Amino acid sequence: MSEIAKEFGVTMEALQEVNAISDPARLQIDQELVIPQRQVAATVTSTSVSTTSAQVVHVVQEGDTLIGIAKQYGVTVEALQEVNAISDPKRLQIGQELVIPQGGTITPTMDITPSVQATPTVVGALEGMVFVRAGEFIMGSPEGEGLDNEHPQRTVYLDAFYIGKYEVTNEQFAQFVDATGYTTDAETAGWGWAWAGEDWEEVEGADWRHPRGPGSSIEGKMDHPVVQVSWNDADAYCQWAGKRLPTEAEWEKAARGTDGREYPWGNSAPDGSKLNYCDVNCELAWKDSSVDDGYADTAPVGHYEAGKSPYGAYDMAGNVWEWVADWYDADYYSKAPERNPQGPDSGERRGLRGGSWSGYEGDARCVDRYGGAPDVRISYFGFRVAASSGSP
Ligand SMILES: [Ca+2]
Ligand SMILES: [Ca+2]
């Protein structure tokens, strides 16, 4: 069974859970195993959740070969060629997106039906996620650049993982709330931070459905990132979805790739085609009037094609700040382990990354670090999900 897990790049636990196998040593010949990795989230609580097979996409990196990619996902080179209409396997291009065909001869099916609606057993539900291969990347800012908390710059190794291609949307968060009856910190307290015309204020009645208070709504914005969610709320969503928040290191690698670039798209200055930040439409004093990104507040996720990261993740610069799993420590880069750093053991604030619609371009740099108390909620904090890879 460990061979099968390896072949398909999933964990033994996931295989066992999905197939209800208590004793992995007792596989039977011809027994059909459902491979969890290609499954769609079993969160069938809304008609808008796709119940077709999830599409996994691999963005070609420097040094990738078709054979290597095939191995990584447990599929054949022929299948990869066929699905992606590649006639010459030697001519892969960096940044090219390859659709990963479904693995092997076992047809992933929709046999997994959610048993409990409110707590779906989601295993390896990778729809809407991008893969970040294992390896080293450059973390932090070089000497003499950036802010104090971005130093020193180091080479850090991370295991492979998946991260949300998009920020979690209002529609997704609504599915979670519909299924669980979850109450956010803003709703419990009766207020959230919001821009009140002159300043940021504790606005009564501001919550994820009413980002700026009772007079506002998310109508027509179901594909925008959810806001007014605290770290606690984000963590609860992730647990429900069978995912987790990315670590701070995972977030940074997913945003900038391995080459130490300043922004997800490279080192060129931000412009209106790459991200949603405080542009000419923005109400705040520090707005950049020379840029028009089309949005005064949040933008629909995935809107800025030219701004996506080397792994194909959108809005890692701007739109909403994103909670990460780690406790925030300004000095952490100077003492974090060089392999799979998980953040300090304790703290008072949780990490936030990437800047937002209300921020200036400096916040949108991949290395910019920020933190907030776990229960703080504001109209520009959101999050995206992550998942560990079963691949070695
Ligand atoms: Ca904007
Ligand atoms: Ca963002």
Image (cartoon, rainbow, N blue to C red):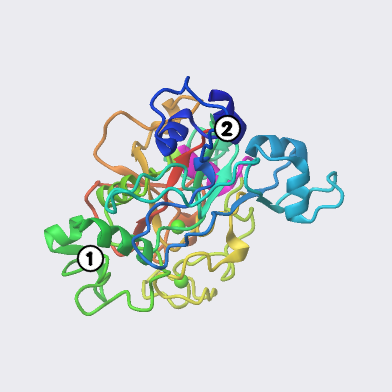
Q: Position of residue 383 (x, y in %)?
A: 38, 53
User: In terms of sequence position, does the residue under pointer 2 or pointer 1 come before the other?
Assistant: 2
Instruction: Give left or right: position of 31 versus 381.
Output: right
Mark 2 lies on residue = 30
| Residue 142 placement: quadrant | top right
Residue 340 within the magenta-colored segment of the rendering: no
Q: Considering only vertical position in the picture, is 338 above or below 56?
A: above
> Which is more foreground, mark 2 or mark 1?
2
Q: Residue at x 26, y 62 (%)?
A: 178
Labels 2 & 1 near each other (Cβ < 8 A): no
Instruction: Give left or right: position of 215 versus 239.
Output: left
Mark 1 lies on residue = 207
Q: Quadrant of the C terminus?
A: top right
Distance of label 2 from label 1 (alpha carbons): 52 Å
Q: Nearer the viewer, residue 218 or 372?
A: 218
Judged from this view, the residue extending furthest toward the top is 25
Q: Residue at x 43, y 30 (%)?
A: 13
Q: Considering only vertical position in the picture, is 22 above or below 208?
A: above
Q: Label 1 amino acid? A: Asp
Report helix, strand or loop for mark 1.
loop
Q: Nearer the viewer, residue 142 or 34?
A: 34
Q: Label 2 amino acid? A: Asp
Task: Magenta stretch: give its range.
Answer: 249-260
Q: Position of residue 130 (x, y in %)?
A: 55, 49
Main secondary structure type of the part rendered in magenta: helix
